[in-house]
Image (tube, helix red, strand yellow):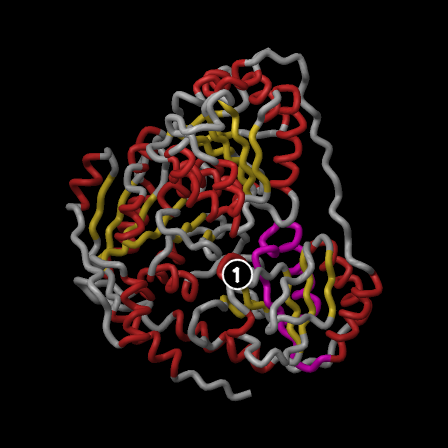
Amino acid sequence: MKTSDLFVRCLEIEGIEYVFGVPGEENADFVMSLEQSDKIQFILTRHEQGAAFMAEVYGRLTGQPAGCLGTLGPGATNLLTGVANANMDHTPLLVLTGQGSTTRMHKESHQIMDAVGMFRPVTKWTTSVIQPDSLPEIVRKALRIARSEKPGAVHLELPEDIAKKETEVEPIEPVRFRRPIPDPEQVNLAFDMLAQARRPVILAGNGCIRIRASQQLRMFCETTGIGVMSTFMAKGCVDMDEDYCLFTIGLGAKDLVACAIDAADIVLALGYDMVEYPPRLWNPDGAKTIIHADFLPAEIDFHYHPDVELVGDLAQTLAMLNEHARAHGKMDWDLQKELRVREGMLEEFALHKDDTATGKLKPQKVLWDVRDVMGPEDVLLSDVGAHKMWIARHYHCHEPNTCLIPNGFCSMGFALPGAIAAHLVYPDQNILAICGDGGFMMNVQEMETARRLNADIVVMVWEDGGYGLISWKQEQQFNHHTVLEFSNPDWLQLAEAFGWQGHVVDDSQKLKPVLEQAFAESGPSLIVVPIDYEENMRLTKHLGEIICRI
């Protein structure tokens, strides 16, 4: 068979369901082979960056990689931002690029560049297929690396002349393996430390949104009552309605939730990626007693020096801790500080729920209504911008992976293409993307993709006519901001041009019914909300006045 046919067969046997991307001349053989597959669906996108974000969100929601496709040269470079975003947020992803013939790769030639070298810093592994018979091994290795903890992106390049060659080898059947478990003696030591503590607290990171890990964490909290604060990406690892849910930590400024970690005499860090919330912000003097539990050993950092490390499958680690907790019985802990933190945050969430402002809507009111409309299994995707900080603080979840926030590489333009992929995974759920007007316009062309797929998604744009997050940060640091304002299109005309339903809401009392209407509409809908970002500096002032009384 042709090498490109073998490539597709290898992907089929690995369980790949989707490839998103833009074909080109040098990947034409692969795309033609892909067209013959009855197991893999190719989704044509309007830009390779959108394809990468779609594949990323598919990977986040399913735990399995999808492919994103580009040709050589500019097709490959256009994929780069989305690939880096997925890799830093530990999402399994397969990057597929074409390449010129091996007879011209060594010299200056049309669109030739070292794509393998370019992808090396933003993937777990990258290689070029230069021998057809090695392809099954390469695909098997790549997909195993992508899925292995911590998951990430892998890149395979197929030169156009290799794609055409004949080969007689067959795909390799995938063999799954069980992740190693932590040393039982270390688990015993860690639990003894917890049992002897007075005010333990859990810091839950990205690793806790794996379904088995989330289930075991909830069981542990039900038994022990220890409070859980999550990073932005770990939202939903415990149910927001439970008394042990302390909501989210991760703002640059000190929030109420940080008071619980200040009061703690031991921190159980579970699946924690310090790229999300650096330990210097919550352990500035490096004095906290820390138990690190994760799939990999702790990153070396002056402010994160664990006393005990439980390295292995996180769900199994929690299951072992659960056995100890059930056997031990009631603990002599003082968790009142955690309960007061939770009560204080609940009061702040509800502060503007009955706001009746017109013209510009308060972020707090918008998110209160969004949470009220969204069901426990519905999925919200946040783009990157000032709105991300409000979502992180004010929108909370009942289930894992129901609020997706890029928080490692933090790339703008993520939410619109990501929502399209979320619809493919959960066609019967409400899918809402919230974007700033800056981030939305970065991949606005994918509105056509959403319309072509008749994706039932709602995209809400918070309009402020500028780069609001940069303005917010410059105001904090310099007491003024540089030129960050821009103009926007006529939103209703834009929606109509792409065949979307369109709504502009400038009355707080109308937002909820319009949102419900948009979810009931067939196909994609756009809601534009003029937003009151004067609340940004008010929040900064409020956070600066927080005093923790331990």
**Where is residue 348 shown, x and y percent of the image?**
40, 74
Q: Is residue 507 visible?
A: no
- Return the residue nearer the eye: 304 or 117: 117
> At 37% across and 26% down in the image, what residue appears?
110
* 474 over 404 or under it: above or below: below
Which type of secondary structure does the marked residue at label 1 adopt? loop
Of residues 474 and 110, which is closer to you in this image?
110
Task: Tell me what residue is drawn at x 28 percent, y 73 percent.
Answer: 475
Q: Can residue 55 be found in the magenta stretch?
A: no
User: Residue 59, position in %: x, y?
Assistant: 53, 41
- Which secondary structure dominates the residues rendered in magenta? helix
Q: Which residue, given by chain and number where applicable, does mark 1 sit on?
A: 275
Left or right, 158 with reference to 183: left
The x and y percentages for residue 240 are: 52, 63
Residue range highlighted in magenta: 197-226
Q: Quadrant of the C terminus?
A: bottom right
In the image, is 85 to the left or to the right of 413?
right
State which quadrant residue 498 falls in.
top left
Q: What residue do we see at 54% from left, 19% from top?
A: 162
> The N terminus is located in which quarter?
top right
